Image (cartoon, rainbow, N blue to C red):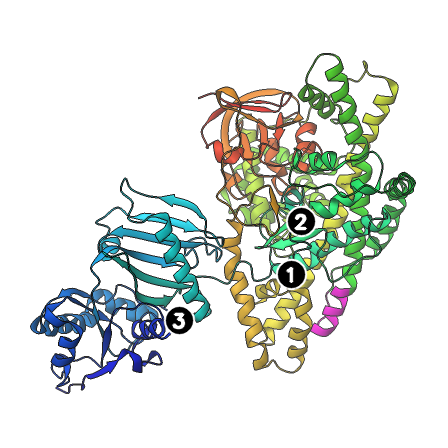
Amino acid sequence: MTHLTTTLVELADVTDARYGGKALGLAELRAAGFDVPAAFVLADADPEALPPGLEQRYRELAPEGQPVAVRSSAAGEDGVDSSFAGQYDSVLGVGDYEGLVAAIRQCVASTGSERASAYQHDSGITGTMHLVVQEMVDARAAGVVFTADPVSARRDLAVVDAVCGLGEHLVDGSTASDHYEVDQRGEIVARVTPDRPALGDDEVAEVVAGARRAESVWGRPLDLEWAIDRAGRLRWLQARPITTLPGDLSAMDSRLAGEEHVYTRCNIGEMMPGAFCPLTASVSGQAIEYAMQTVQVVAGFQDAYVEDRWLQLGYFSGHLFLNMTEGTGLSSGILGNSADQYSMSICGRVVDELVPLPPKSFPVRLVNTVRLTTFALTASRAIRRLDDKLAGFRTPSAQEPEVLLAELDAALELYFEATLTHVRSSSRAAVPANVLEQTMVKQAVKAGGTEEEGRARASALLAGGTDVESAVMLGQLDDVVGALAGDADAAQRFLGMAPADAVADVRDGDGPTSRALRDFLARHGHRGYRELCLRDPSWGDDPDGLGTIMQAMLRARQLGNRGERPARAVDDSDLPGSVRRIARWARWGAAGREATKSRMVLVAHHLSRGYRLLGQQLAERGVLPDADLVFFFDRTELPALVAASGAGGGADLADMVSAAQSRREALPFQQRLEFPDVSVGRPVPCVPQPPPSGEDGVIVGRPASSGVVEGVVRVASTVSEAQALQAGEVLVAPVTDVGWTPYFTLIAALVTDIGSSVSHGAVVAREYGLPCVVNTQGATRVLRTGDRVRVDGDRGTVTLLD
């Protein structure tokens, strides 16, 4: 049998990963000035061929029989691509030379263990065993520190886990451990500790500060082992890269418009819920940015549109935010609107952090008010112009990437116009709605009632809008489902098929039900969940999603429990004629707002198809590994990709493609992030807290649709979770958009974390007579599926009954 010759290598001589990641990590820590216990390396460890100077070197390391640890440092272990942690044996507390030789033998033998062999096979790693022989620390406390949270992938959090005594107690789970999460300011934002914590807060800070210094040396997130000895001295035992992290969640963040600017997810979170791919941010996000800047220009607060800056919005950790500080420019520059009114309309509360800008002079505000009012009230002409352009607009579909990209860039102009038209229409709708609410609140208070009663009356007066697009859409789909329910054989066939196959079976038929479904798809097939996301498919492109919704609606009909759109007239007979006119304008404006949103989404739908085609073309030419990756580039990066496709690709794109893949890996982690409703400066994810509740378990929100109902809660954070809805349940969701609308035929009431009386969910809830409470600021975190509640849409309360 041939044996390797084991070589003794001093830690100071380790300069690369040839002796394994553990040896290199210790060497780099030591070279950077960290307090590392003395150690040496046995390269190509073989217990049958130990170096002649080993015993002498061991006695220098451990005079008087001081204990040492023998740890594996195999090739490929604790490296950049894989950790291999725990797959090989470590031996602690070695107290003599014979014990050292035995420990070497045990560690080398562990390379053939079942667990190590399996890991080697799965990871494709094979390598020679090297060992680190290291002075043991008489630890009072020990543990690990991650400079990025390995669970949430947040790089702004450091995570410390600690135990009393040796760190091995943390690994084997034999001792209750401390857990700390520390933000970039050094503050502990979360902790879980036993009765007797292993660390004091100052020691947590010391560990985190050292770890972040190491991260700055390495230039990447690290996992470090440490120990604090009996004298309080912090020692560093190991450093390795965190191999399980996706791309940096903040890699594509926009620049702050101002360090003290106030950002919020309210309002924008209704239109753009969740996290979005970079292409969506640079297309849909920029379209909204353009529209909002243009309004500021019209109102005289901004001189001109600034193309290369995020001013009205911000894109942080994959989420879009509204810049309220820039928004207060309107409040300072027009009549009849204050910063408090503005923050109430956006967040449902007065935002104390928002500092009002100095008001303009009265003549300036008067002129600006006239200009902005005229701009909003003349939206009809803009809608007609947009319709003329949409009549001839088709999905960009050129067969060559260069030509297709040019078509997409041209289509962006139409998208910007459609978005601006929708903003004008929304402004036209918001003015009478706000005036109506203020009027009804004043009347209620004057009559001895409450502001909530006034808001509830205003919401009731907003019901019964003519041809509200979302309600019409739901009515059409419900008619299709009703036709299926009326034919027992057809219903059984539909429910017995896979959702996508069921939709295709009906769509491609010849009967009236098939024609009705085709009519629905022709008018509304561009709509869907997160419909401004270029990556998420519309109903027309996602028969599986549409089929799942239709099957749920059909089952509800068979149970005889479904929402019915009430045929009711608005009772405004007790109101002055002027107030009745305002209410009619508000209802008309809400319908117009929904219609222009549909036009805006139609352009986004065509763009989505066009960009997907571009991705397919780039994948076919070998520029991208798959078509989906196109959505993880910023729009400004696409010309380089397209240019490479004409030249047959190129190695210079490797970094761009790798970065896009990292962004795609990051998106699921970004989706799980939650933020405070208001942030000063860069928004930082938070651990959400329950909303403030009134007495007796009452959650207070804003009334959005009248009525009182009791029912069982179904909490759904995403539309996919809503698929579990049962007929008659109370839907509790963060926010709803058009993609949720079909489920309104099942539910008894709607409760949302954010929203306003003119948000999508509120509008459709009113049309279907569903009690609705919005802006609860966190009902999804208080209530649980199965809870029984009373939803009072008149008072804006949700009461937990049991």
Residue 461: x percent and y percent? 75, 23
Q: Is residue 209 left or right of residue 42?
A: right
Is there a contact, CB below 8 Å, between mark 1 and mark 2?
Answer: no
Is any part of residue 204 visible from this angle? yes
Seen in the picture, residue 5 relative to 512 is either above or below; the reply is: below
Of residues 626 and 21, the one nearer the viewer is 21
Report, in whole angstroms, how far the alpha carbon at label 1 lies from the one at label 3: 29 Å
Picture layout, residue 468 above or below residue 161: above
In the picture, the disc for residue 80 is 3
Can you say whether 240 is above or below 389 in the image? below
Any mark on residue 279, and which? 1
Amino acid tagged 1: Leu
Whether residue 569 is visible to the viewer of this picture, yes or no, is no
Quadrant, the C terminus: top left
Given residues 738 and 352, the one toward you in this image is 352
The N terminus: image quadrant: bottom left
Cα–Cα span, label 1 and label 2: 25 Å
> Which residue is most to the top?
448
Q: Which mark is residue 261?
A: 2
Task: Please identify the quarter of the rendering in which residue 235 is found.
Answer: bottom left
- Magenta range is 397-409
